[in-house]
Image (cartoon, coloured by chain):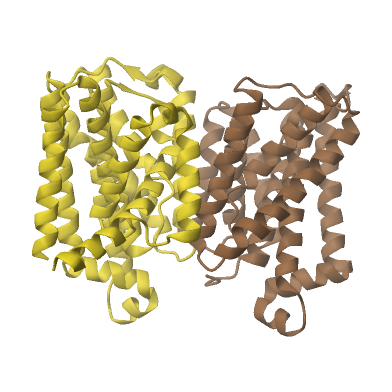
Chain colours: A yellow, B brown
Amino acid sequence: MKIDWLAAVLALAALAAIPLVFTSSYIIGVMTVAVCYGMWAASWDFMSGLTGRDNFGHSLFIGAGAYTAGFLNVEFGANPWWSLPAAPVIAVLFSLLMGFPTLRLRGPYFALAMLSAATVMQNLTIIFSVYTGGQDGLNGLFPILDSTLAYYYLTLAFLAASAVLLKALANSSWGVILRAIRGDEAACQAAGINVTFYKIVSLAISAAIAGLGGALYAHYQLQVGPDLFAVVLSINIIIMVYVGGIGSIYGPIAGAIFLNVLTETLRGLSEYRLWVYTLVLMLILFFLPQGIMAPLWQRLRARLA
Amino acid sequence: MLQILVYGAVISSIYALLAVGFTLIFGVARILNLAHGAFYALGAYGAYTLTANAHLPLWLAAILSVLLVGGFGVLMERILVRPLRRSMLAVLLITLAVALMVEQVLLLIFGSEARNVPSMMDVTYHFAAVDISGQRLLALGGAIIVLICLWLFLQYTRIGSAILAIAQDAEAAQYMGIATDRMYSIVMGVSAAMAAIAGVLVAPFQTVIPGMGLLPLVKSFAIVVVGGLGSIAGSIIGALLLGFSETIIAFKISIEWSQIVSVAAVLITLVIRPAGFFGKRGAF
């Protein structure tokens, strides 16, 4: 356990040191985006990785958070700091709306309802272009902090806080119950556990962090568009979780940062991002169902200990 | 009023074609096929490229396109889905990966601009102050004929009975000597071909773009939830309900709000009657 936290602190220090080593604003930008993806992947993993209820529309919460930031900032001229508390609240409302009908049921309903809801929201943002700016989205958000470097540290701090929160929850009795739901839902119910309650609250926590990440992303891009609701975004996040190792929280964060940096480093690849990701997904599904990062770390830790 | 009736019937029949294929492969093989919309898009693009580039007559292009997509479905089932069938998440992910791949390939070959497919029946009929193009009527008639053929196939052929037997109890069917794996391939082919037929039929009056498969997938899912996952009769009724309510809302309120119908229908059904109209409770 100790070695896990030590490694986490080291990883955080490494992430914090990157802009000091590579001072270009381009790299800071890439890392800021990667950190946002890290928040999204970790929050996906907390709900879906632990309980086994796969969320195919995580972008619903991301888009909800980002558009909340966009509306507050562009339409109402609110101080950009307000986005940070408001975005998670709206995302949680969405999660309750989706969670209550679908999470009571077994079967694929939750996965597909999330997929549908995200797709329909994407269409609605295009259809109601008077309010949402349509395909172009909302432009002209204000930055929260003037310096991109300071903003990178702000997002990194939020990532670290979310990771600690999620990991602590996953290691607590709460996490045990979530994993038990994954194993045998009927047995949990028989043991007197209100499984629906646990699943819905977990989804709400997951949505809050995804929405917060969406708002941070929006205030970095200074623009929000319908693509934030896209199915492709949800799938990218799932792929990152898979690469990292499902159910481990820290693995998906590593996976998200790794894949973002990889596609940005291989400059020629960024156009074929989706191809690379789909290929990676197929390889993992067939050959490495445990992912890459988490098993590597397990092996390394065994050697260190 | 009559206009709503006709347009609603056309949309419902196409939805039924899509949803029945989607529910068939789920009911028989327990495969939730997220590439179903991709088959639909491939059908439309197949008809387009075979007429525009290979200069085949439209009817031949349509048939070839449907057969090719059916074959693609069989290949996908054999190579990609079968090894992963034990895990539902893996099946969902692999079919979704196929859907994304298809969209990317179409984007690469045809670009993002909309393509026009010529109409198979270039006439317009007038019924009591309603104009309706021949193509829409053809879509309606074609969809009904295909659905009847499917029903006859399932009820009156040996393969059809084998498929129905697997849907009831796959293990028992295997003990009776039915080659379940081969049947899964056949059903996937049939389901893919039906989606392609829907794509071919609507291509002349729909915008043919690489991402055109996503919305039909969402609609199919909504219909299947309303009707009951795995029930063919349920999906036909669900298609009628969804098709007509979308058309009514499009005509009476605005076309924008009709987009919300499918998601609202899913959420309401799951709250009131999660099994859908004809689904069995606790089937999962």
Across and down, in percent, residue A254 comes to: 26, 48
Across and down, in percent, residue A31 comes to: 23, 32
Up-down: is B213 above or below A189? Answer: above
Task: Identify the residue at image location x=44%, y=31%.
Answer: A269
Q: Is residue B5 visible?
A: no
Q: Would residue A170 be found to the left or right of residue B91 on screen?
A: left
| Direction front: furthest residue | A303
Task: Identify the residue at image location x=28%, y=79%.
Answer: A192
Q: Quadrant of residue A49?
A: bottom left
Q: Would residue A272 be found to the left or right of residue B32 on screen?
A: left
Q: Tally the numbered discs.
A: 0
Across and down, in percent, residue A165 comes to: 15, 53
- The quadrant of the image that shows the N terminus of chain B is top right
Q: Would residue B214 be found to the left or right of residue B17 on screen?
A: left
Task: Identify the residue at image location x=75%, y=54%.
Answer: B189
Q: Quadrant of residue B210?
A: top right
| Direction top: furthest residue | A140
Q: Is residue B283 visible?
A: yes
Task: Using the image as rendered, state which of residue A245 and residue A127 is in the foreground.
Answer: A245
Q: Quadrant of residue B227?
A: bottom right
Task: Using the image as rendered, state which of residue B203 and residue B178 is in the foreground.
Answer: B178
Up-down: is B175 above or below B284? Answer: below
Up-down: is A279 above or below B150? Answer: above
Across and down, in percent, residue B241 comes to: 65, 47
Task: Identify the residue at image location x=82%, y=21%.
Answer: B129
Task: Using the image as rendered, state which of residue A270 and residue A182 is in the foreground.
Answer: A270
